[in-house]
Amino acid sequence: MNEPPRSANPQAAADTVQPSVGNETVSYLDELNDAQKEAVTAVDGPVLVLAGAGTGKTRVLTVRLAHILLQGHARHWQLLAVTFTNKAAREMRERVASLLGVPVEGWWIGTFHALSARILRAHAEIVGLKSNFTILDSDDQLRLLRQILEAENIDEKRWPPRVLLAVIQRWKDRGLAPDQISEAEGQDFAGGKAQALYALYQDRLKTLNAVDFGDLLLHCLALFRADADVLARYQDQFRYILVDEYQDTNVAQYLWLRLLAQRHHNICCVGDDDQSIYSWRGAEVANILRFENDFPGARIVRLERNYRSTPQILAAASGLIACNEGRLGKTLWTESPEGEKVSVRGAWDGEEEARQVCDEIEALHAKSHALNEIAILVRAGFQTREFEERLITLAVPYRVIGGPRFYERREIRDAIAYLRVVVQPDDDLGFERIVNTPKRGLGAATMQFVHRFARDTGIPLVQAASRLLETDEIRPRARHALARLLDDFQRWRSLLDTVSHPELAAQVLDESGYTVMWQTDSSVEAPGRLENLKELMTALEDFENLQGFLEHVSLVMENDEAADDDKVNLMTLHGAKGLEFETVFLPGWEQGLFPHQRALDEGGAKGLEEERRLAYVGLTRARTRAIISFAASRRVYNQWQNAMPSRFVGELPAENVDHVVQTGLYGGASPPQGLLREETRTFDGWRPRRRRVAVIEDASYQVVARDDDAAGLATGQRIFHQKFGYGRILDIDGSKLVIAFEKAGTKKVIASFVEAV
């Protein structure tokens, strides 16, 4: 049964690690606290370890594994340790090897997919495969689905393969084979043909002797159900099962674990129901919540002592997450010094919010605070742009973790390529990037022909394509598509001097079909890509023309990636799980952004609770300093939108929070007397301006969009605006003002953003 040689037996390490004798304390347990020690030594029966943020769950997992071996409860091939990522599996193997002093190659320590593949290769023939089956990546999957759609005469433009793949992946996450899909499911794709297409896809995979990642668990489940002897063999072998991040398991993973644990019932799951934030990729928080029902007599061990954050941060995070009903409950505590309260700050708009955050980062760095110990954690990817722009302006190095920088994202590069060709038709690289994006029937053969003609004649691709259109060298369908695209570029180019560049950019993306391409894409990335495109339109507003913007992007793309490793960390809240930093900035805590409106629309009450768990994760990334901020207004797709502070702001315990909000941000009411201070700030080169800042001791304030925001203002009156400086009011229309600024020219602004002088 794939057993490594007996020479790898970890019992040989017992002498160096000192196993227990009688009632003597085992040395490797000495550094554990009481709860950790209980989690390690409770080896018999089902155990759920509720491991709060920063409570040492990785240490518990590895020491528990070593303890089982060193105390002779099992041999290493009788242990199954499951993680979610290759990184976590590698870290566990390294820690166990270090603790035991023996190599761990060949041990059953790995991810769900890796371990399932290992089992499947040993018994592939039972599920109709050969042991040398191929595991397909997403590109191969899409290519295969495209072939199936074509064979079934289904228009892939109307029913994209990527959408079908997402549907199939969701079914596989739930452990459902094609014959287990109900008639009601899949009705929204290709007139209800999704189930049949799924079956064709699975048949085609078997013909190719191939599987996708979802199949690794799905086929294992089929294997266990089809052959009771094989299931019994693995159930008997794995006397002890350890599972990391149990709150992130999907249905298929849950079923896989339950089947394997039925013989010995010695399953230990480590997780945190308060950190279940991945429902969008199939995770079911219900798996951890019902552990006691699934495994009667289970012992629950709560790891509540935090070794990361200050009491103030922990109290704020605990008070927030206590608002969730779907949780098992625990309270984090620490022996660390009290520390600073969590700071909540309001800004007039997103640009000022980025300025406040980045200016404070610069100030912290001047006081020798390491940049790599600072993180900006955003709810949505589009938020990174304003912070990236500001950090570049201040020459503060940064890195984007878990994804490319804003202007390096695929959809932004595509959009910019369109704009580059509009401005400069000889831009071959830009034209080549988007000539068939979205799909226009301009395949590789057509473009190779255009390339060859361009090289032979020494002219740019656009000119070469234009000349070829006058011949019959290109087949009619491709010639028609190419002619239409060149006509579109010519028309867009003619609008450069008559249409504002933000409007033109939006027109280009809409008329080219690029926006629709992402609107019809049902992948989990698509909504974020659309948000990024909206943010790109916002970015264009800051420049006088398209040429100026494209030049700026070129300079931004040259941001010093070769700089030293001391960089500010910029990432989404989802990407921050498992990390920790000295100082954490949490911007964008506004209704609709965080909690995100899409999560509320799709998930309802469950969606809200997951968003709250995401806020909890963000707060508990901070060791000594956590700064939350929100803006009174954000510009989205060239439109100003009033914003309300997130409901999560009001749910933070008042005694653990310091609210610092500019006067006027919360409905115009006067803040409590004695809670005002004055400070002098300089806004990007404008003259210093003394403003009052209110320190609010409770979270009862709200940002209110008022119809009388212009009350007290009159045409001809001199005012001050944070971004544009001094000016005079030319016209008043409700809450909107037309102002002639002394340096910025005539602008339309919202009345609440100005003050009389």
Image (cartoon, grey):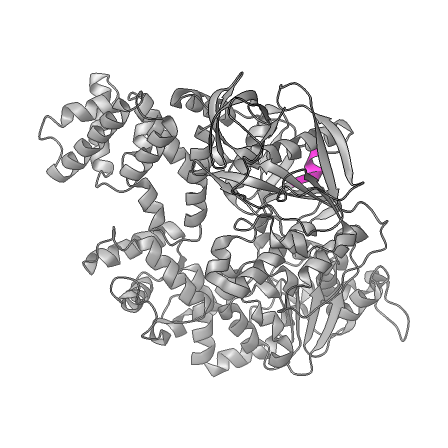
| Front residue of 252 and 456 | 252
Q: Quadrant of the N terminus?
A: bottom right
Residue 23 in sight: yes
Q: Position of residue 278 (x, y in %)?
A: 54, 58
| Front residue of 294 and 374 | 374
Q: Position of residue 194 (x, y in %)?
A: 30, 65
In this image, 405 relative to 438: left or right?
A: right
In this image, 629 relative to 23: left or right?
A: left
The dominant secondary structure in magenta is: helix
Q: Position of residue 275 (x, y in %)?
A: 63, 59
Q: Quadrant of the C terminus?
A: top right
Residue, far left: 472
Q: Quick check: 246 above or below 473? A: below
Q: How many marks?
A: 0
Residue numbers of the magenta segment: 371-375
Residue 71 in sight: no
Q: Position of residue 642 (x, y in %)?
A: 52, 43
Q: Residue at x 46, y 59 (%)?
A: 601
User: Is residue 716 located in the magenta-colored stretch of the structure?
Assistant: no
Q: Quick check: 521 above or below 749? A: below
User: Is residue 374 located in the magenta-colored stretch of the structure?
Assistant: yes
Q: Quick check: 620 above or below 388? A: below
| Front residue of 30 and 359 | 359
| Front residue of 132 and 721 | 721
Rendered image quadrant of residue 288: bottom right
